[in-house]
Amino acid sequence: MQKIHRPPHHLGNNGIYFITASTFLKKALFSNSEKKNMLTGVIKEKSSKFGVKIIAWVVMDSHYHLLVRIENDKNLSGFVKGVNGKSAFLLNRIDNILKREVWYNYWESCINNEKDFWMRFNYIHHNPIKHGLAEKMEGYSFSSYEDWLGKKGREWMEDVLENYPIVDFSGDK
């Protein structure tokens, strides 16, 4: 019997998606810099392999969030499976644990409008504060915030935050 994905994935070509992947039992398996750097590297490697453009990202102790553009909808599940499969293998190697289940599931939401896009963008960058890993968005090493700050500047980042306030999307799953 084939396992049915819950919730079902509804995809379209050339779409922008907000993706969340959570560890099994929400365990803090990526709780140090070595593990977060490894996961970040795998995400970047697999995005290149599957033609996924990462717009914004954050890696946390027990999950990650991505805002991505996908040209071919068929690449989304392969991308996430590639990220989760390789990172699980490498994490288990780092921790010297055989066949531990690392990832529980992933969810994606198709971004339908500009407001949704920027609110998710801000949510991603605010996530380390929400989870008590940082006091401010600037300076958290495992997100795209610093990249955007360097590209667009502080005034632009503050303007995006002011115009599209942070909303808690945790109930979307």
Image (cartoon, rainbow, N blue to C red):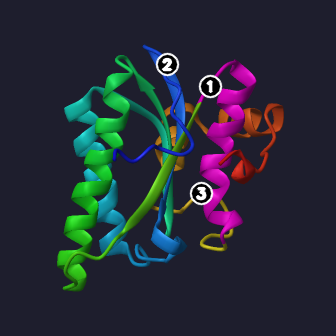
Tell me where residue 115 appears, x and y as whole percent: 75, 25
Disc 3 residue type (three-letter): Glu
**Quadrant of residue 34 within the rendered picture:** bottom left
Query: Mark 3 near mark 1, Cβ–Cβ under 8 Å?
Result: no
Q: Secondary structure at mark 3?
A: loop
Q: Of the numbered discs in the image, which one, if any, rests on residue 15? A: 2
Q: Nearer the viewer, mark 3 or mark 2?
A: 2
Q: Quadrant of residue 158?
A: top right
Magenta region, residue range: 110-131
- What's under tag 2, amino acid-wise? Gly
Question: Regarding mark 1 in the picture, which secondary structure is present there?
Answer: loop
Would you say the residues marked 2 and 1 are in contact, meaning their CB atoms lie under 8 Å apart? yes
Q: CA distance from mark 3 to mark 2?
A: 28 Å
Local packing at callout 1 (Cα closer than 10 Å; few below 14, some 14-19, many 20+) is: some
**Residue at figure coordinates x 69%, y 18% from the top left:** 113
Q: Which residue is mark 3?
A: 138
Residue ID at (51%, 33%): 9
The residues tagged by marks 2 and 1 sit, at their Cα atoms, a distance apart of: 7 Å
Count of all numbered marks drawn on residues in the image: 3
Which comes sooner in the sequence, label 3 or label 1? 1
User: Which residue is found at the position 68% from the left and 31% from the top?
Assistant: 118
Relative to 11, 124 lies left or right: right
Magenta span includes 126: yes
**3 sits left or right of 57 in the view:** left
Q: Which residue in the structure is indicated by mark 1? A: 111
For discs 3 and 1, the disc positioned in front in the rendered view: 1
- Residue 77 image position (x, y, % from top left): 35, 36
Q: Amino acid at mark 1?
A: Ile
- Please tell me which of labels 2 and 1 falls first in the chain: 2
Residue 143 appears at what percent x and percent y? 48, 53
